[in-house]
Image (cartoon, coloured by chain):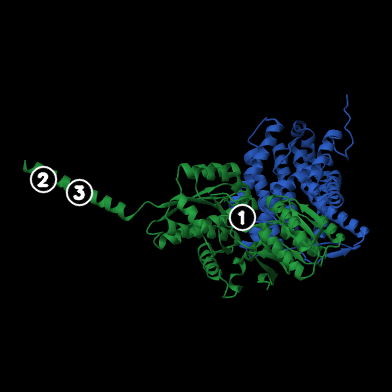
Amino acid sequence: MDNPSQLVQYILTGLSNGAIYALIGFGFAIIHNATGILNFAQGEFVMLGGMFTIFILSFLNIPLPMAIVLAIAFSTLVGILFERLAIRPLKNVKPLSLVIITIGASIFIRGAAMLIWGKDTHALPAFSGNEPLYVYGATIMPQHLWIFGITILIIIANKLFFSYSILGKAMRACAYNAYAASLVGIDVKIMVLLSFVVSAAIGSMAGIIIAPLTMTSYDVGIMLGIKGFCAVIIGGMSSGLGTVLGGLLLGLLESLGAGYISASYKDAFAFIILLLILFIRPEGLFKQKETQRV
Amino acid sequence: MKKKFFSTMLFFVIATILFVFTAGAQAFAAPPIKIGALFSVSGPAAFLGEPERNTAQMLVYEINKAGGIKGRKLELVVIDTQGDPAKAVQGANKLIKDDKVAAIIGPSTTGDSMAVIPVVEKAGIPLISCAAGIKITDPVKKWIFKTAQNDALAVARIYEYLNKQKIGNVAILTVSDGFGSSGREQLVAHAKEYGIEIISNETYGPKDTDMTAQLTKIRASGAQAIICWGTNPGPAIVARNVKQLGIKIPLFMSHGVSSKKFIELAGDAAEGIMLPSGRVIVASQMPNTDRQKKALLSYVTSYKNLYKVEGDHFGGHAWDAMMLLKGAIEKAGDKPSAIRDQLEKTTKFAGIGGTFSYTAQDHAGLTKDAFVLVEVKDQNWKLVK
């Protein structure tokens, strides 16, 4: 096999993994922008999406699309419960305490999933067949097209929601200044809850569309969560294009690094990038530096 | 006065009855023989420990139902090591000091086994490990035996087949954990004696979800076959990625995925994949002349009846350990040193993992005959003849 098509393969692989990271990163960004906390249970929503779908498919004899909708609904419910039971009861605490609570919640959700569903890995059937598609001598699966398509849809929906809808604008207002937002009549609590709803839904969606490719088990959330976190850090915590580019960049570097340097360091690339960004440009690669007005 | 005499008599009668009754009960039921079990029932190696524990418990139940060993019941004390060597050592100490077990079966992993060896050797208790690592019984340690097949035997099976097919250049793709690195060592170490050249040597992480980058590199290397060494789910992803990339060269897996779970995860992509495995997954396809067939079928059916899932290769390691122990106790009694001496005399014990013959120089007891090559055909295992 000649070198150009090898390169195309690395790029395709990198982009499709990157799209997944971006989607998971979105969940981080939305909650961070509404509440100022980093939700480290984001990876668990990804796991819940995949596991719920498999669980529903094996117990109820319903078509895949129905199962997916139900699985997203269940995962979102877990997100709501999480916010109501673990985040809202704490008033006037530092964001750091909340971040630690999300780590606790992620361990709890993972443990519960292990007890309920066991430790086995499960595979979800592909949405549209298993025959690979050829692109310039490289191959991708039809499922990759689903991943690209859904990621693009979610980016557009996000943009529309946060820029044009009243609810989206209200959420942004809370993120900017919760106190001022409450003075103009925005219910901050509802907005925080809503941010958990949206990010749980997006996270579980990500978990479902990747499950046919990567398979899923109770512990897939850890690594995917970290990769999503890297994507959002590179993107500077934006819930828009920055995170998408961050995810794609991470996916590409991983895949090219594994192909041309060594696959043993695949995960190390993600962390090296994360550290470099945090050292050199903590505000993210694609964000303009905020200017303080005096 | 008379009344007092009567009550004294009554007291004596009752006391005598009680005495006779308890003494009699003691004479009839000798104390049970305690066997310790160290299995990683939870944690990352639960796929080993769980079937092993289930198998051991099933056997103890069956042996006791049939009247025990020479009228004495067995008692199994199971400790979950969670795949953590520190917990395995604590567990071994507890089994030896508190429970005073006659022998120990397990641990499930090579790491746990290596950790408990010094403890067990010092106490002088026979231990039959269910882990595969070659260093457990090489060099030979007085009190340590094992039932799981050495990785080298699995490697030999694959290389022999490659020789037959006249394939010389192979690519290996191994997982970066204990199982994968042991396999990698053996693959590299034995390549030369079979005239095989490893022209591409790649690894992947145990939690990786996409191996197309490594496989693209392997495809470019011009290898004639791929050997992948890992435990689920990694190899299933490799199988899917190989299909996705349209790679047509033969793909070999290790015995680490020789359970139905692999076929279920890899789906269509599993078709045509070959791997060395213990006979248990193809028990019914073995010729009737096979020495192990009787044990295999009995294990497979009773496991399926009790637990409603297929008994596998890993549970088989515990079956062998337990039955070897049973044989030794039947012949030599329950003194630890007598059990050890008797174990070492085991010859041609046809178990699940193979036909065991221990000697003073060999505490692993198997030859490469312990593995057969199987192929996935129509979503099922098929024996390659």
Q: Chain of mark 1?
A: B
Tell me which corner region of the image, top left, top right, bottom left or bottom right, holds residue A92.
Answer: top right
Q: Are marks 2 and 1 in contact (CB under 8 Å)?
A: no
Under mark 3, the amino acid is: Thr
CA separation in Å, label 2 and label 1 = 67 Å
> Percent position (x, y) of residue B80?
55, 48
Q: Residue furthest left?
A: B1
Q: Which quarter of the rendering shows the C terminus of chain A?
A: top right
> Percent position (x, y) of residue A179?
75, 31
Q: Residue B192: in sight, yes or no?
A: yes
- Same subunit, labels 3 and 1: the answer reads yes
Q: Which residue is mark 2?
A: B6
Along the line of sight, which residue is nearer the eye, B232 or A121? B232
Give the chain ID for the green colour.
B
Query: In the rendered structure, which disc, 3 or 1, sits on the residue that comes first in sequence?
Result: 3
Query: In the rendered structure, which disc, 3 or 2, sits on the residue that comes first in sequence?
Result: 2
**Of the numbered discs in the image, which one, if any, rests on residue B16?**
3
CA separation in Å, label 3 and label 2 = 15 Å
**Residue drawn 86% across the image and 35% down it:** A281
Q: Which residue is mark 1?
A: B47
- Indicate left or right for B337 with B355 as reference: left
Along the line of sight, which residue is nearer the eye, A186 or B242? B242
Element at label 1: helix
- Same subunit, labels 2 and 1: the answer reads yes
Query: In the rendered structure, which disc, 2 or 1, sits on the residue that comes first in sequence?
Result: 2
Q: Chain of mark 3?
A: B
Q: Residues within 10 Å of mark 2 (few under 14, many from 20)?
A: few
Q: Residues within 10 Å of mark 1 (few under 14, many from 20)?
A: some
**Drawing shade for chain A:** blue
Under mark 1, the amino acid is: Phe
Q: Residue furthest bottom?
A: B288
**Of the numbered discs in the image, which one, if any, rests on residue A39?**
none
